[in-house]
Each structure stands twice: as C-alpha cells, then as structure tokens.
Amino acid sequence: MNELRDNSDVGELIQYIVIKIDDEQYGINIKFIDNIVRMQQITRVPQVDEYLKGVINIRGEIVPVMSVRMKMGLAEDVITNKSRIIILKTDAGDLVGIIVDQVNQVLTIDSNNVEKVRYDDKKAKSNASFVSGVGHYEGGLVSILDLEAVVSDKEAKEKASNAS
Amino acid sequence: MDVSQYLSVFLDEAKEHLQSLNDNIMTLEQDPENEDCINEIFRSAHSMKGMAGTMGYTRMQNLTHDMEDVFSDVRGGKIKIKSADIDVLLQCLDAIQGYVDNITENQDEGTDEHQNIIKALADIRNGGGGGGAAPAAAAAPAESAPAAEASAAPADGPADGADGSSDYRAIRLDPSVKSTLEEAKSQGKKIYGVTVHIQESCILKAARGFLVFKGLEEIGEIAVSEPNTQDIEDEKFDFSFSLILITDESKEKVEEIVKAVSEVETCECGEYDPSGAKPAEEKAEAAPAAEASAASKPAESKPAAPAENKPAAAGAGGAGAGGKKPVGKPVVNRTVRVDIEKLDVLMNLVSELIIAKNSLISAANTSGVSNGNVNEQIEYLESVTTNLHESVMKVRMVPIESVLQKFPRMIRDLNKTLGKKMELTMTGEDTEMDRTVVDEIGDPLMHLIRNSADHGIESADLRAQRGKPEVGQIFLHAFQDGNSVVIEVGDDGNGIDAEAVKNKAIEKGVVSPDQAALLTEKQCVELLFHPGFSTAKQVSEISGRGVGLDVVKSKVESLSGEVTVKTKLGEGSTWVIRLPLTLAIIQALMVIIGEEKYAIPLDSIQSIEDVSPSDIKFVENKEVINLRGSVLPLIRLSEVLDTESTKDPEEDMVVVIARKGDQLAGLVIDELMGQQEIVIKPLGKYTNKCKLISGATILGDGEIALILDTNSIF
C-alpha cells in the first residue's frame, strides 16, 4: 500500500481535490482518484467491520465503500445532497470508495509547499494519523489525506489478532 | 537457420512425446512384448532426436539417440526389455524432461551430459547380447535419421504415395476440373503444373504450403492440387506437393513466387496440357465414383501401404497405422492455440453481455413495453447469450487428463519407495473442466493419491492376513454429474479408524475430550480436514507432514467445491471431490431477506418448501423441522445476516432446503424472486472477510445482490 503514500519529487506541481469531512478540509492527490460519484444505494455486506458500508456497482465492477468518518472515529455519516463517494484507485488496480461530506475544489500546490507530518508519536485514535502532510496555498492550509491509512484495514487485523 | 521461431512448437511437441514415452514405457513394463508400444516409443524417441537435432540441442539429441538405439535393438528382437531397464529408461525420460525444462526457461538445454544414463543405456544394449551387430544396425537409422523423419514403421506407405504426388504430371483430374482447364486454355490463359519440394528440415510444412498457395493465388487460380488443400493444411503430405495453376503470368514469375517462400527446396514448373492428362483421368474414373476427387488417393494408399510393406507391424500395428501419422503423432483435430488470457477477456465480455441482457429484460418490464415483438426479441437474445456462454465455456474446458497422466508414474515410484504393491486405475480422464479448475486441482488429487498409497494401502503382510489380494488397488474416477464434476479417489486399504482419529485429535488439542465424546463417527473422520492434523505414526517422505488434507479441503473450497470422505474400517476409503463446471456464471435462485436481495447457487439447493411455524420443533434448543421423515436444522437467514425479517412470525415460512455433501438444512427466507443466470464478481479485498458471502452479482437494474455461500452457513 505504499503506493498510496505521496512521495513525489520536489518542486512538482500536484493537483489535489479538496473535500470536506466533518468540519475539516482534506486534500486528495488527484492521481489516486478514479471517479467521483453521487451518493447511491450501497449494498450492505454482513459481518464486516463497521466502517465498511458495503459495495456499489461502478461500471460493472463491485467496489467496496468505506466511511472515512467512522474510520476516524467521528459520528455516523449524514447523507446530504452534497455527499459524494470518491472512488480511489490503488496502483494494484483495486478500486475502493470513500464517503465524503462534500467536494469543494481542485487545488494545485507545489510539492515544496507541502510539509510532511512526522509519524513518531502517532496517536491511535487521533485524526492526525490520517494526515500525511499539510499543504500551503494562497487561501490557507489544507491537510493532505493519508490514503494509505484511510484505506488500510490494519485496525481490523489488530482486532482479529486480539480476538484470537 | 534461425530456429527460435519454432521454439514453442518444439517445446509443445517435446512435451507431447515425453508424455507418450512415459505412458508407453509404463505399458511396456506390464507387457514387455507389446510391439505396438515398442514401435511407438521408437518413433517418439526418434522424432525427439530429430527435433532436438534441428533445434541444435546436441545433448538432448545424444540422449534420445541412445534411447532410440535401445529400442531399435528391441524392435529388431536383439534384446528384451527387463524390469531393471525400465528404471533406466524412466531416468532417461527425467533427464530429457530436465533438458526440456531448461529450454523452456532460458532456451538453453543446460550442460548436463547425463553420461551415466547414456552408459546405462549402452549397458542395456550390450547386456542384451549381439553386441557386435547392434551398433551397426543402430547406426543405420541414426545416419538417415535427421532427414528421414518418417523412417519409422509406416514410412513406406506415404513415401510411395509421395512418388505419385511428387510430380504434377501425375495429378488426376476430375472431369469438372478438366473442363475448367480446357476452357481456360481456350481463353488463352496459360496452364502450369507446379511441383514444390520443401526442405526436409522444415518443421512447419503446412505453413510453407499455405504460403505457396497464397502467393500463387495472387496471380492466378489453382485448379487442383495433389494432395488437396485440406490435406496440405493438415500437414498430411511428405515434403512435396503438386498443383495446377491457371494464370496469365510467365513460368519464371511462378517459379519466382514459389521460391520466395522460405524453406522451399526446389520448384519444378512446366506447361500443362489438360488433354494430355487423359490416362490419369481414366485411372480416376476407374476408382470408385464417389472418390474420384484427388483426395481419394492419399486416403486409400496410406492405410494400405504399411500393412503390406511392414508385416512386422501388421498384426497390431495395422489398425493403428491407418489412424496414425507417419511421424508417430496422434492424429489431432485441427486446432488453434489461444492464449488463456484472451479467453478470460472473452469470458468477461460474455459476462458483461449477460448483465446487459438482464438489464434489458428488467428495463422492458419496468417501462411496461409488453409488446409481443419486444418479448420475442428478448427471448431470442436470451437464447443467443446462453448459447454463447456455453460455447465460450466449452472453449475454456480441457480434459482433466493433463493432470491425471502423471499419476501412474507417481504410483510406480511410490511402489518402490514404500515397498508396497499398488495399482492405479483411472476412469473418466476425458471429463472436461474449466481450465482454471484443472490447473488447480492437480495438487489436491496428488495429496489424496499419496495419502491412499501411504496410509490407505496396508503392508503386504497385513493384506495377506486380511485375505485381500496382494496388489493394493487405488482408483480415481472422474465423471460429470449435472452441473458439477465429481472426482473420486479411493483405495481398498485400511480405511480410516475413527477412534484413532478421535484420540489423535484430543492429543493434538483439536477437540476437548468432552466434545470428542459427542462426535459421531462421521464427524470424527471429518476431523482429518482440520489444519495441522496427521495420523501418520511416522512422518514419511510421502505424506504425513500434517498439511495434506486441510490443504486439499481449502484448495477445493477455494474452487467453490467440496470434499467428503466415505470410509469403512478395514475395507478402504473414498474421497469425493465435487467441483462446479465453471466458476464465472451460474444459475442461482434470487431471494429476498429483510429488504435485501441475495442469490443462492442453484446447485446447492435441494428443494423449496412452505413450512408452517407450528411445524417447528426444538432439539437441543435449536429449531428443526421434520421434512418427509428426516429432521433438518432450521437456519433463519435474517438472523445470520443481521437483518430484520419483514414477515409476520405467524405466517407460513418459505424454506430453501440446501445441501452440503450429505447434510441438509432449511434456510428460512422472506420471499422468492425466481431463478436467474448470474455472473459472479469478486467482492474485493476489503469485504471478503465475510465467510457467508462468496461473491456478488449485478442485477438487471444495476443493483448488487450478494451470493450466499451455503457451505459456510451450515
């Protein structure tokens, strides 16, 4: 899953899609985005982790959808007209959808202006662990979403190993 | 000559020959006098030598050469094959296999000379006596070998035929062809007879022939050829063929075109006078009327000639020779080799088509177009897609034989290593399954056979004590049963001792003594499939690493199949593997549970029943129903799937009776939607933790329905 961690060269211009989850803005590197679709009926899959909302049909392919909110330990998603599912594509070709509250804009940020967040004191349930860096742009700051952390099912594995 | 283009042909054929050698040597072990077999081995060894020589693999050539020599002597009656020789021969095959493997990997045969095997082969020949005469006799075929591919038994036949067909002047004319030629002549066109000789080292004769035809057809019309086009495409000709061409071009031009094709040795070309062909025509007419076409000639002469010229092979070989090609290859159907990935793409497209068809049906229903014509067209589309799916599925099907053919050899080797006497009988090798399944099923079957050999078959003493025949029987039966394929592997050995299994399970901590006491005999035997379980008293080389059976089980289940075991202590056991014919598209029953739609594979459904809530009984606090005399556990799917049933508890329940091996269970659902052909899609790696769901499918309206894995619900 390292392919989802953004380690592009210095000085490169990177486009980010800025989304809103809860009250925070997050940027997602555009190269990982396959598609953005409106909220649609999600088919529930029984007996999976709570944050996995189910599966949807994207052009004939079954794509799992997860709630970033629940992964971050926030309140349950409130589906509004502005809710969207962002379909991410990993380098391995897997598609996975994440539910966001709103999609705001596209930002171009010089990679020099993105500060990496250090991981040494990762707190288990803090939002910080889902942020890989902070980007500066003219209008302010935007957190860059750490897609690897969002998409990984590390917690599930921990849970499973605790259980057994 | 650059031979890399022939590499894949070479490898394919080498594998074919190796397998045929393997099979025949095994047969020979049983029946050392089998002439057919000896001839076949000789031919295969000979062809391999020729091929290896052409490709420049000298070590492989040497080894096959020596092997061929041995069989040349055997054929000549100078030596007889003894059981010890078979070992050497098999080692020799392994060595050749080693060369082929090396070549597959890096186009190089490697540097191993296998001197010891060569020496052992020489010993066989010397040991057989007549040492002085043998080398000379063996040298003869060796010299003529690379050229005369066909020096093996039926060679003389086609060679005779070739004499006739090697000259365009000898072509026999149909009356109709003759009139065409005369008409063309009267129109002032030129008629040439052309005889083409192809280099004898050429591997792809048919392709060269085709290129000649293609080239000539650009400048004129080919009136007739000898042998006919079909036979040339099928490589049913020696190294030359003739044809008559109607064209406006000059003779030089014709020759130039023919010679432009690579590997054409010579080309004779001359004016052809149709009226001069009279005698030939008469000859043709003399032949049975229906067979007057040019094709009749090779057809007639081939089977007849070997029988005459080769009395040695006549008895048994007579029938065989007619059906066999001169080089000793089995007659194969006309085939096209296709990359399996292309078939996967095709299969995916068919899947998409079926989804689109389902969408169309549901769209027509919802938009209320109940026009008769629309329905008719949809039904037509439905039958076309179903047929298309079946055809594509068939294309992907291969006989299970390719997996099974290595087992007789394995059992033979096990005989030696285990010091037991065993015999393997197999039936249903031609049972066809999806390519992906066949590729995967080899290892589980090997495990089961090794298990039977190691644990099943008793030692000779014990067998004698029990009054069983000395030779232990291991069998493998494969057959198709409805929409699934069943493979049974079993033995007439010891059977499984349920008590021993139970004790072992307790010892290993797989079950607690209390639990074990409650287990039925059948359940005890099922414990064998538990990971990390092995009853082998001693860990042997053959099996007993404690990974065998649970690997078999998980592999079979990953192919959506199931494995069960029937056993009787002291009489033997049978393992039954049941696999679906195809993995991608299945018939399923669509049901509604709560608000959600699910698909249950039709294969696992026994029947559907209406059950009144008053019929529910309780056994050990679990709900059961009594269905026609048998008591079945009742499973409420709404509870299993964490959803709310929409039905009134007082109402009659719809119960799907599902089957898993011999077990039955009643699955309570809310509503039936009907049967549908569904395309299985994987759930992806995040949601596949749910064991109850084996996949998902897309319904006509784009909605997703999950596919229930009834095996894991039980």
Image: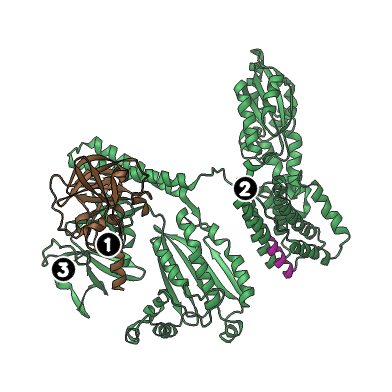
Q: Nearer the viewer, residue B149 or A12?
A: A12
Between A49 and B544, the one lying in front of the other is A49
Residue B469 is drawn in which quadrant? Answer: bottom right
Q: Chain of mark 3?
A: B
| Residue at image mark 1 | A122
Q: Which residues are magenta?
A: B82-92
Same chain check for tags 1 and 3: no
Tell me which colouring the rendered structure shows.
by chain
Report the side of B135 relative to B593 (left or right). right
User: In percent of the image, x 50 and y 75: which residue is there?
Assistant: B545
* Kind of residue at badge 3: Ser
Helix, strand or loop for disc 3? loop
Q: Nearer the viewer, mark 1 or mark 3?
A: 1
Please state, as top left, top right, bottom left or bottom right, where the C terminus of chain B lies in the image: bottom left
- Chain under callout 1: A
Q: Residue B331 got which mark?
A: 2
Callout 2: few (<14), some (14-19), or many (20+) C-alpha neighbours within 10 Å? few
Is residue A86 rendered to the left or right of residue B534? left
For marks 2 and 3, the one nearer the N-term is 2
Q: Residues within 10 Å of mark 3 (few under 14, many from 20)?
A: some
- Name the foreground residue: B185 vs B292: B185
Q: Which residue is mark 3?
A: B612
- Residue B310 x/y as whole percent: 77, 50
Amino acid type at image mark 2: Val
Q: Quadrant of the N terminus of chain B?
A: top right
Q: Residue at the spot x=65%, y=33% of the render? A: B209
The local secondary structure at tag 1 comes to: loop
Chain B appears what colour?
green
